[in-house]
Structures are given as C-alpha cells and as structure tokens.
Amino acid sequence: MKKHNFSAGPCILPKSVMEQAAAAVLNFDDGLSLLEISHRSKPFVDVMENARALALELLGLEGKGYKALFLQGGASTQFLMVALNLLEKRAGYLNSGTWADKAIKEAKIYDDIYEVGSSKSANYNYIPKGYDIPEDYDYFHCTSNNTIFGTQMKDFPTSPVPMVCDMSSDIFSRQLDFSKFDLIYAGAQKNMGPAGTTLVVIKEDILGKVSRKIPSMMDYKTHISKGSMFNTPPVFAVYVSMLTLEWLKNLGGIKAIEKENEKKSRLMYSEIDLNPLFKGYAAKEDRSLMNATFTLENENLKETFESMVREAGINGINGHRSVGGYRASMYNALSLDSVKALVEVMSELESKA
C-alpha cells in the first residue's frame, strides 16, 4: 500500500532523493560509503560548496552579500546564536507561536527583548498585525510559519532594522523577496532533508557589531571563514539537502513548487470548510500553505475517522497537543495525490455520518 506521509517533521522527502541517498550510503566515492568518507575529502567538500551555492541561487541571493551555512543544533541553537551575534542593547520579537516564544526566552538571557506583537492569548490561532518596529532596536525577529498552529505570515514588514526570520517550516515553498531579510535560518527536516543540519543564510555586513566575546562555535564569522567546515559537518544531512535542492531546481525552483503547494492547500482547506464534520483552527487569512490544522466537530467519530485514515495508508496527521485534532503537513515533496487521498477519507466520513 502506498503511504501518504503528512508528518510535521522529519517529513516526506522526494522519492528520487531517497534513492540517490540510499545508493550513496553503499557507494559514494570509489567504493566508499558516504557515511565513512572524510569530510575533508574533495568529493564531500564539493557537496558542501554545491549545497551552499544552490541555497543562495534558489533564494535569489547570489552576489548580494549573503553567505549560506549548514550548521548543527537545529533552529533551537539559532535562537541563541542570533542573540549572541546581533544583540547589543535591545531587540524586537513577534510572538506568533511556540517556537517564536522559545526564541524570545533564549534571547532574554542576554539583554532587553520586547514583544512587538503577540497572539499567545488566543493560543496562536492568528498572526499579529499592526505592530511597530522601533528604529533603535538591534534587529527584528519573526517566524514565517507556525507548524503547530497552522498559521503563516503572508506579508512581512519593511523593517528599519535588520530582519531575522525563522523559516524552518516553509523555506523554499513560496516566492518572497528574500533580500528583505538579513538573516534566515531553517531546520532541514521540513523542506530540505533529514534532521541533523540547519541552513543559515546571513548578510555578512550585519556581523561584528556587538561588544561581547562570542565563543568560536557560536560565532557566524567563524563558520563563514571556514565554509561551514569549522568542525565535522553532518555529512549525510548536508548531502541529502543538496540532493533536495537540486530536485527543486530541476522542477523549476520556488516559483514552480509554489504553484503545487497552492493546489494542495486549496484542496485541503476547501474540504475543511465545506465538510460540516470538520473545523479549521487557524484564522482564514493566516492559514499556512504548509500545515493545515483542523478538528472534528463530533468526537464520537474520532475512532471511525482514524481507522479510515489508517486503512488509506495516511500517516502523521495527529495534531500537536497544544491544539489537538489533526494537522496535515503538506511540504514540498508531498504529492497532490496524497492530499486527494486524505480529502476522500474526510468526504467518505461525511457520507457515513
């Protein structure tokens, strides 16, 4: 039976990417496995350089003063690194979800952190709007997509200070003017590859302006100077990320995948809105292209629905405990056919009820 993987992360990867990665585990360089070659060998150095170049190319940031890094520690480490490298006096954060809230908590270790807007009191079911960003802030931090709650920023402010964005769950999924951002970070395990590496894209001229001493491993300048090879990189995760970025480029890049993502989300949200058995969680104007969150109106149907989901080969739609219900994560590699399979189950449940 075909499995339809709606997992929120680690999530679905393109089949061709998994096949190439599997082959490389057995034989990547003249009989040596990808898992055992030296990370200093030319074959892997080429992988790292290609992955970094592809990231900038797909984001339209080549030749614009940006560097791409593949680091470790997940987006959670970036919560700390951003503050260490950029925070001198004060910064503003948009609190739009669990991960934004955690980023605020980490940054508060160092200095004055202000929430310019928050939807926490509504359990993050919408994106805050109408906020101001003071010109004396060191930077402004936002989270583009909130996986748990199914909300997504549709518009970004024109910031008078450097803008930092956590794009972990929607990077490479839609067209944006990425040059508006001075620093972007994203865990690989949503749209790029397996867990284990984090992409950081940073405009070099925002660095070197804080007075504190920064430990070498936490200093972006260290990793830029060493081409993401200051310490042993996560070889497999970087390689699979490179393959995924090549796959995306061959599809036609972000412009092409955005069209597919819009088809998937329209189909999914149409069923949620038209089927009286289900109710969407996020405010309609802020609904995510990547993560559709919804609940069953009649909990007595829960066992029946989940049994039908399993029989259809659908995996990973249980909602996060913060919201409950269900969450259909529709990342780049998920096919429209998988969304159709879920919608058919939801429609069938309505006909049985």
Image (cartoon, rainbow, N blue to C red):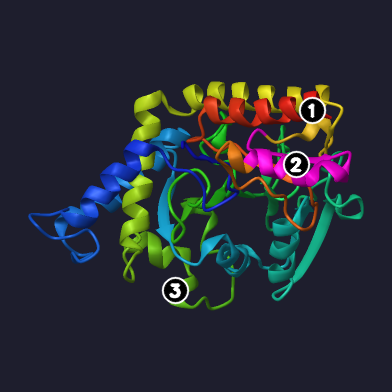
**Is residue 311 toward the left or the right of residue 17 in the image?**
right
User: Which mark lies nearer to you, 3 or 2?
Assistant: 2
Q: Earlier in the sequence, mark 3 or mark 2?
A: 3
| Extreme residue in the left direction | 30
Q: Nearer the viewer, residue 304 or 210?
A: 304
Q: CA distance from mark 3 to mark 1?
A: 57 Å
Residues in magenta, as a range: 289-309
Q: Earlier in the sequence, mark 1 or mark 2?
A: 2
Name the residue rendered at 72%, 30% in the picture. Answer: 346
Q: Amino acid at mark 2?
A: Thr
Q: Amino acid at mark 1?
A: Lys
**Where on the picture, by quarter, is residue 263?**
top right
**Picture disc at residue 304:** 2
Q: Which residue position is annotated with label 3? A: 217
Name the residue rendered at 45%, 32% in the picture. Answer: 60
Q: Nearer the viewer, residue 106 or 213?
A: 106
Q: Amino acid at mark 3?
A: Met
**Is residue 272 toward the left or the right of residue 11 in the image?**
right
Callout 3 crowding tier (Cα within 10 Å): few <14, some 14–19, many ≥20: few
**Picture disc at residue 352:** 1
- Residue 210 vs 247, above or below: the answer is below
